[in-house]
Amino acid sequence: MNVFIRADASVTIGTGHVMRCLALAKAARLHGMTVHFVCREHNGAALDLIEAAGFALHRLPITGEAPLPAGYEGWLGETWQQDAARTARVIRDEVGEADWLVVDHYGIDERWEKALRPVAHRIFVIDDLADRRHDCDLLLDQNLRSENAPYQGLAPPSATVLIGPSYALLRDEFRQSRARASVRTGVVKQVVVFFGGSDPTNETEKAIEAIRRLNPAGIEVDVIVGASNPMKERIAALCADLPYMRFHCQVDDMAHFLVDADLALGAAGVSSWERLALGVPALVAAVADNQIENMRQLDELGVAVGLGVSRNVTVEGLAQAIGNLLSSPRIVSAMSEKALGLVDGEGVSRVVDRLVEVVA
């Protein structure tokens, strides 16, 4: 079975789309599927991660031939018509037709998807905006949703729609590490700071400064950034000045850090499910507008404390929020227990089973 994945990463987009697609690709490969990635050569595209995982990678060039469209569509790097034509050409040249075409991109909607129908037997859309129409056979939104049918009228009536973190696309390391994850005591000794691969608003530095001001005794902090983080050298220097902080760049074993963490500071995006699967209480900020609803839901469920939209989060406010949790072990422990009950780490297996069932 041939699977093609159209997804992008960049300093602006972040790495979450590519990372969750890599989790899907690795699980699909274990089921005998051949997986190809089609990605734009953006700055911070994370293409080395795809190649290191052993997947075929087809690079779409940055042409600069015309002004980019406004909004998410501009993230494609060219018009949707040009992007669709290039992607279709890749599929035709490689295999003729794809058994599954996976689309994980905010800049793509039903126009692009309809254009790819001649070279794709089935289309699988991964989305978490619920703001545009899709032409697909399967749709996944792994976010928490307060409404019952967010994609009614946005996906074909014949499409199967999967909603919620029980389908979260987590790498196998999280499923394996979950076996030794436990409800935290609430006493915070290990802290993980990770605001995504690129962290364009530099929330990491705010967190470092907030913890420095608190100067808590007996705590060790792992600060993790991606290779595409433009501030990584400055962050490394800040960590070097604090004996209880350890700097890490582009780790491939995030579960190793989270399973031993008593508290995490991060974004309210796709990494939320990684933390929840391992029972890690968290302080989360919405680093993009599409994370605001997710942050609110996480806060209401009592598995994280919402800090607000990142542009409004101050060092002072963050320090206060951290201090509140350090002095409230019962609350921290309760957050951990609820987190473990929300995400079990088996989502990617459930999704791949759907791909296999439909084709069979």
Image (cartoon, grey):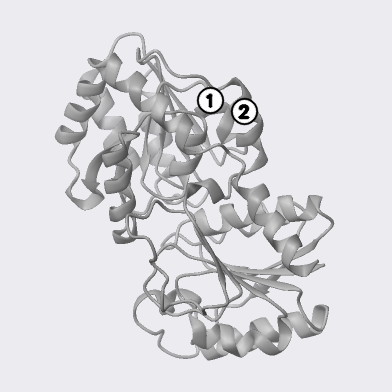
Residue 168 at least partly seen: no
Residue 351 falls left or right of residue 154: right
Where is 46 relative to 190, above or below?
Answer: below
Q: Is residue 179 among what the camera can see?
A: yes
Across and down, in percent, residue 304 comes to 32, 35
**Residue at the spot x=36%, y=73% of the render?**
131
Name the quadrant containing residue 207: top left
The image quarter in which residue 307 lies = top left
Going from N to C along the chain, the mark reached first, 1 or 2, is 2
What residue does disc 2 label? 177
C-alpha span from label 1 to label 2 = 7 Å
Residue 353 location in percent, x, y? Answer: 71, 55
As drawn, the label of residue 19 is none
Identify the secondary structure beneath mark 2: helix
For numbered disc 1, what is the local secondary structure? loop
Which residue is disc 1 drawn over? 259
Q: Nearer the viewer, residue 115 or 90?
A: 115
Query: What residue appears at the point 68 percent right and 85 percent down from the top-left corner?
Result: 88
Q: Nearer the viewer, residue 253 or 129?
A: 129
Disc 1 crowd, CA 10 A, few/some/many (<14, 14-19, 20+) = many
Mark 2 Cα within 10 Å, few/some/many (few <14, many 20+)? some
At label 1, which amino acid type do we have? Val
Residue at 35% across, 9% down: 218
Whether label 1 touches label 2, CB < 8 Å = yes
Residue 336 sits above or below residue 81 on the image: above
Q: Nearer the viewer, residue 268 or 94?
A: 268
Q: Is 99 located above or below residue 351 in the figure? A: below
Q: Is residue 309 left or right of residue 231?
A: left
- The quarter of the rendered structure image containing the N terminus is bottom right
Q: Amino acid at mark 2?
A: Ser
